[in-house]
Image (tube, rainbow, N blue to C red):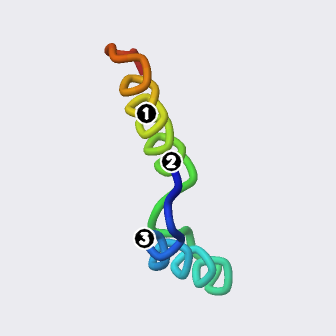
Amino acid sequence: MAFTHAWHQAIIEDFAEAIEDGRPPVVSGRAALDVHALIAALTRSSQEGQAVTL
């Protein structure tokens, strides 16, 4: 499943600004990994036609 960078533009910009400003980004790496795990589980469930456990 492909995602355009435009959907994430604000998050990408905030990350770059956070580096410049020396502050944490709005979305942490941990939160982003959790979302990607959910997306992977949804994709796998759809492909296999059954529920998957996270």
- Give the residue at x 66% y 78%: 19
Instruction: Please tell me whether mark 3 sits on a helix, a strand or a loop.
Output: helix
Q: Nearer the viewer, residue 47 or 22?
A: 47
Q: Nearer the viewer, residue 49 or 23?
A: 49
Question: Where is residue 11 drawn, in percent x and y?
Answer: 48, 72
- The CA distance from mark 1 to mark 2 is 8 Å
Q: Which residue is mark 3?
A: 7
Q: Nearer the viewer, residue 32 or 23?
A: 32
Instruction: Please tell me whether mark 2 sits on a helix, a strand or a loop.
Output: loop
Q: Earlier in the sequence, mark 3 or mark 2?
A: 2
- Give the residue at x 64% y 79%: 22
Dot label at residue 1: 2
Please state which amino acid type lies under the numbered disc 1.
Thr
- Give the residue at x 38% y 32%: 42
Q: Which residue is mark 1?
A: 43
- Of circles 3 and 2, which is in front? 2
Please state which amino acid type lies under the numbered disc 2.
Met
Question: Where is residue 49 drawn, in percent x and y?
Answer: 34, 17
Name the image quarter holding residue 15.
Answer: bottom right
